[in-house]
Image (tube, rainbow, N blue to C red):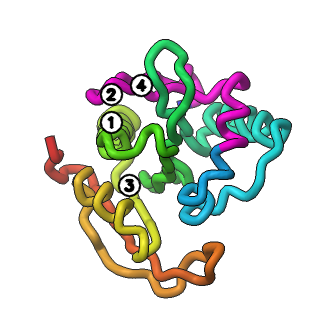
Amino acid sequence: MSQTDQPVFDLANGYELRPWCLDDAKVLADSCQDADVQHWNRPGRLSLDDARDRIVRWEKRWRTDKAAIWAIAEPGGGSPVGLIGLADFDLDGGSAEFLYWLLPAGRGRGAMVDAIVRVSRWALEDLGLHRLRITHSVANAASCRVAEKAGFALEGTMRSALLHSDGWHDEHLHARVQGDAWPW
């Protein structure tokens, strides 16, 4: 990963995946105000400077093989409508975990399913990972549908696994491993 620039991917639904840039800092800071992003992802409040620092940190994490974070955006440098990434990288052990969110402008168009499938293909086929995970609150039905549509099998429930703004939530664990059939 660190030897190349982070790839840009076109998605079937008209969006693209591209690295976050400093010009996106306001969108990132403002995303923390969205009730759904705030509730399900615990991003905390970000000032404009905090958002810029986070974007710089994501680029460093790419260069050091720690994470790969993309903006889901309109093509040609358009404003981000979401975030998708792989974190908790274990390149030697062949695994990583998805993180993602969409702003209202990106919801309801299949963008996240498309993005997860595209990033999964890259991670499994190009990067050579063996196992990818998605975890989400059992109360987050939209994330469960996304994981299932993207071909991630439900493996179980982790009890009281993540603290959200309204308390501890049980989390579903979904996974895709090398050799699983693609949803399309």
The answer to which of marks 1 and 3 sits earlier in the sequence is: 1
Assess whether mark 2 and mark 1 are in contact (beta carbons under 8 angstroms): yes
The answer to which of marks 4 and 1 sits earlier in the sequence is: 4
Q: Mark 3 sits on what residue?
A: 132
Observer-side mark, 1 or 2, equals 2
Q: Give the magenta range.
A: 2-30
Amino acid at circle 4? Glu
The answer to which of marks 1 and 2 sits earlier in the sequence is: 2
Residue at 55%, 50% (x, y): give it: 87
Mark-to-mark CA distance, 4 and 1 = 10 Å
Q: Where does the image place residue 108, in percent across and percent down from the top left?
A: 33, 45
The answer to which of marks 3 and 2 sits earlier in the sequence is: 2
Q: Between 67 and 43, which is closer to the camera in this rendering?
A: 43
Mark-to-mark CA distance, 2 and 4 = 5 Å
Amino acid at circle 1? Arg
Assess whether mark 3 and mark 4 are in contact (beta carbons under 8 angstroms): no
Residue at 54%, 31% (x, y): give it: 80
Screen quadrant of the C terminus? top left
The answer to whether 46 appears left or right of 107 in the picture is right
The answer to which of marks 2 and 4 sits earlier in the sequence is: 2
Q: Mark 2 sits on what residue?
A: 11
Q: Where does the image place residue 84, in percent across and percent down from the top left?
A: 49, 43
Q: Secondary structure at mark 4?
A: strand
Mark-to-mark CA distance, 1 and 2 = 8 Å
Q: Is residue 114 magenta?
A: no
Q: Where does the image place residue 18, in percent across and percent down from the top left?
A: 51, 25
Observer-side mark, 4 or 1, equals 4
Q: Is residue 14 magenta?
A: yes
Mark-to-mark CA distance, 3 and 2 = 20 Å
